[in-house]
């Protein structure tokens, strides 16, 4: 009977996920959300260096190696895109299956899974189309926490699957997993405490032995999780243990700190500092426009000194106490502010996520009152767990707000994780007490359905802008392919956006499963997060060059920048290095992309 019920829930969940998939495909096409994923895909596929590469920099090595092996099969498929999409829909299937099984009968199960589908469409839907590896990591972590909360007391299968999902999430995006891990820890604590409370109410069982067994189960779960994370990290470190990769990782960490969490101080106002570290104005401009691959003297130490200096300036401008109070004020505002999103990401809004989380907190609180009204110890413990969850979530939110890094690829998975933990907590509280979940399920379902039309508008607007942007870049990349004997260095900001030439705020992103070509391409950007890596050096060597500065002066090598942008910084840079150059515009693509030949003046 149990197997039949499990099969039925699997079929129902699969059908719901299929329906979501069909609707998603109807309203738009799949895109890599950011050009970060595009570059990762190119490294993995071999389009970057000419050979599928397991060192894709952003992911930990074991999972990168696995994906690169798929590309080594020779099948010209978008394996990286397939991998991310499969993980998203697998998570939806697992959650949907568990949600359906909460129903006491088929009718209730259908209501619950419809409520879940409405949340997917009304809250998460755009992320299914505009796919990003950080979001996938957060989704895996959230699903794992939900599995732990919804697992039966004597079942190991769900816990094992949860550990695997957390480890895969860590391999995909370690920073995001570590950000969500405290919430997963709270989920384990909630599961243990609420299960002990339920055992205390059961008169027909021996409690002492079961409590010890329960404690041992979750201690083992945490131990296996820690050991698994340690093993993943060790495997990654071994794969990146050669000196070139070690030095690049140091450069990468300092670059991330400078660009993502600090800023580049103005040159004129901080000339004494720049002189002290031996950085000229033209070199500082390379940092501002991100084209720092042009200068080999910009290294990890340079970036660290600038980041530390910027941090000191920021501390002088605003003390920690003031920054904390501002973060608290903004966090409280974001918890309750309701504003319909007008676009996919910016201007950023938290609705409907914040309302979904708020509603679930209210339902959990009511459930605590109703279920434990005659048990003060149980009431205080259950409400205390809810407070612990909110406190943990709040600390993490204040951390990301104070760090100034709160894009939706981080905040939306955080909301989703909190919602799933609250849902798991709610079902644990009312479990075996004949209390009904249909009221919260109906309310969440209605909230999701109300926001579905809003998400359709967001998806359609984003699809239009991305398609318009992509069309221009496809023309540029076709130009590169038509001139295979030449090599092109692209200005970093030009590789991201056409600027004012296209209506909307979209940046370049590649469409998945479309015009798939995993062959080596004859262009690269003059900076970016892969700059100065062994992979970047391998690409240059494959093209026949030792470094970007000399390569740009070679025959059949060109510089690409938006026609509206100033290029005098490039000639100023070479002049400072003792080389006079002329910048000759030789072509113009779509009235947007200017192709320059950098010629040495003898």
Image (cartoon, helix red, strand yellow):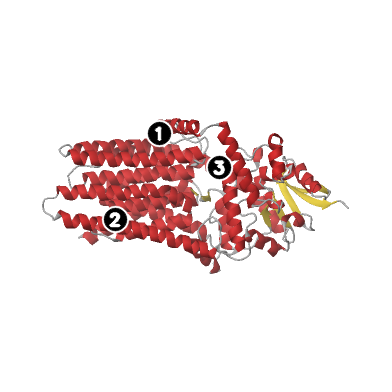
Q: Write the residue at 18% across / 50% down.
A: 199
User: Could you tell me residue 366's position as x and y percent?
Assistant: 24, 36
The tag earlier along the polypeptide, 2 or 3, is: 2
Q: Write the residue at 43% across / 37% down.
A: 453
Along the viewing direction, whichever of 191 and 138 lies nearer the viewer: 191
Pointer 3: residues within 10 angstroms few (<14), some, or many (20+)?
some
Closer mark to the observer between disc 1 and disc 2: 2
Where, by quadrant of the figure, is residue 74 drawn? bottom right
Left or right: 85, with 494 as reference point: left
Instruction: Tell me if residue 224 comes above or below residue 306 in the rendering.
Output: below
Q: Name the residue under label 1.
A: 335
Q: Mark 3 points at which residue?
A: 261
Q: Are marks 2 and 3 in contact (CB under 8 Å)?
A: no
Say which element carries label 2: helix
**Is residue 592 something that shows in the picture?**
no
Q: Mark 2 points at which residue?
A: 218
Along the viewing direction, whichever of 218 and 149 lies nearer the viewer: 218
**Is residue 12 something that shows in the picture?**
yes
User: Could you tell me residue 496's position as x and y percent?
Assistant: 62, 46
Say which element carries label 1: helix
The tag earlier along the polypeptide, 1 or 2, is: 2
Pointer 2: residues within 10 angstroms few (<14), some, or many (20+)?
some
Instruction: Tell me if residue 282 comes above or below residue 234 in the rendering.
Output: above
Q: How far apart are marks 1 and 2 (CA)?
A: 32 Å
């Amino acid at each position: 009977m149990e197997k039949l019920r499990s099969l039925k829930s699997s079929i129902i969940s699969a059908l719901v996920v299929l329906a979501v998939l069909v609707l998603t495909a109807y309203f738009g096409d799949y895109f890599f959300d950011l050009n970060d994923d595009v570059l990762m895909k190119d490294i993995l596929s071999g389009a970057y260096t000419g050979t599928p590469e397991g060192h894709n920099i952003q992911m930990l090595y074991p999972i990168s190696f696995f994906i690169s092996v798929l590309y080594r099969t020779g099948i010209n498929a978008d394996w990286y895109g397939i991998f991310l999409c499969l993980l998203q829909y697998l998570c939806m299937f697992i959650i949907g299956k568990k949600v359906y099984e909460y129903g006491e009968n088929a009718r209730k199960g259908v209501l619950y899974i419809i409520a879940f589908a409405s949340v997917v469409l009304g809250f998460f839907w755009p992320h299914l189309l505009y796919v990003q590896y950080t979001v996938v990591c957060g989704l895996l972590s959230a699903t794992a926490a939900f599995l732990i909360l919804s697992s039966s007391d004597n079942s190991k299968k769900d816990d094992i699957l949860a550990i695997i999902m957390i480890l895969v999430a860590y391999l995909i995006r370690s920073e995001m997993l570590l950000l969500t891990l405290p919430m997963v820890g709270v989920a384990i604590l909630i599961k243990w405490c609420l299960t002990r409370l339920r055992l205390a109410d059961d008169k027909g069982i021996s409690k002492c032995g079961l409590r010890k067994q329960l404690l041992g189960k979750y201690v083992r779960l945490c131990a296996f999780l820690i050991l698994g994370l340690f093993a993943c990290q060790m495997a990654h470190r071994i794969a990146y243990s050669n000196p070139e990769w070690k030095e690049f990782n140091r450069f990468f960490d300092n670059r991330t700190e400078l660009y993502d969490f600090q800023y580049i101080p103005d040159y004129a106002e901080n000339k004494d500092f720049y002189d002290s570290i031996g950085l000229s104005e033209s070199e500082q401009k390379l940092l501002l426009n991100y084209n720092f691959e042009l200068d080999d003297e910009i290294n990890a130490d340079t970036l660290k000194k600038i980041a530390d200096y910027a941090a000191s300036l920021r501390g002088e401008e605003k003390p920690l106490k003031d920054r904390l109070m501002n973060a608290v004020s903004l966090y409280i505002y974001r918890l309750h502010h309701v504003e319909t999103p007008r676009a996919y990401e910016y201007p950023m809004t938290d609705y409907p996520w914040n309302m979904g989380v708020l509603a679930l907190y209210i339902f959990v609180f009511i459930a605590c009152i109703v279920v434990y009204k005659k048990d003060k110890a149980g009431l205080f413990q259950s409400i205390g767990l809810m407070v612990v969850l909110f406190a943990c979530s709040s600390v993490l939110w204040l951390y990301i707000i104070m760090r100034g890094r709160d894009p939706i690829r981080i905040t939306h998975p955080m909301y989703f994780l909190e919602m799933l933990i609250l849902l798991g907590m709610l079902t644990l509280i009312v479990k075996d007490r004949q209390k009904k979940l249909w009221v919260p399920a109906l309310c969440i379902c209605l909230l999701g359905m109300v926001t579905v039309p809003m998400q359709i508008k967001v998806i359609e607007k984003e699809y239009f802008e991305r398609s318009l942007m992509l069309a221009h870049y496809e023309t540029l990349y076709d130009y590169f392919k038509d001139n295979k004997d030449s090599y092109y260095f692209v200005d970093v900001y030009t590789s991201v956006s056409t600027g004012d030439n296209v209506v909307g705020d979209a940046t370049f992103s590649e469409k998945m499963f479309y015009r798939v070509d995993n062959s080596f391409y004859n262009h690269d950007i003059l900076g970016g997060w892969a700059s100065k890596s062994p992979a970047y050096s391998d690409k240059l060597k494959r093209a026949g060059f030792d470094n970007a500065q000399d390569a740009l002066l070679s025959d059949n090598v060109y510089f690409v920048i938006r026609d509206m942008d100033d290029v005098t910084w490039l000639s100023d840079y070479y002049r400072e290095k003792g080389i006079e150059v002329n910048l000759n515009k030789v072509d113009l693509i779509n009235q947007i992309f200017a192709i320059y030949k950098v010629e040495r003046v003898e």
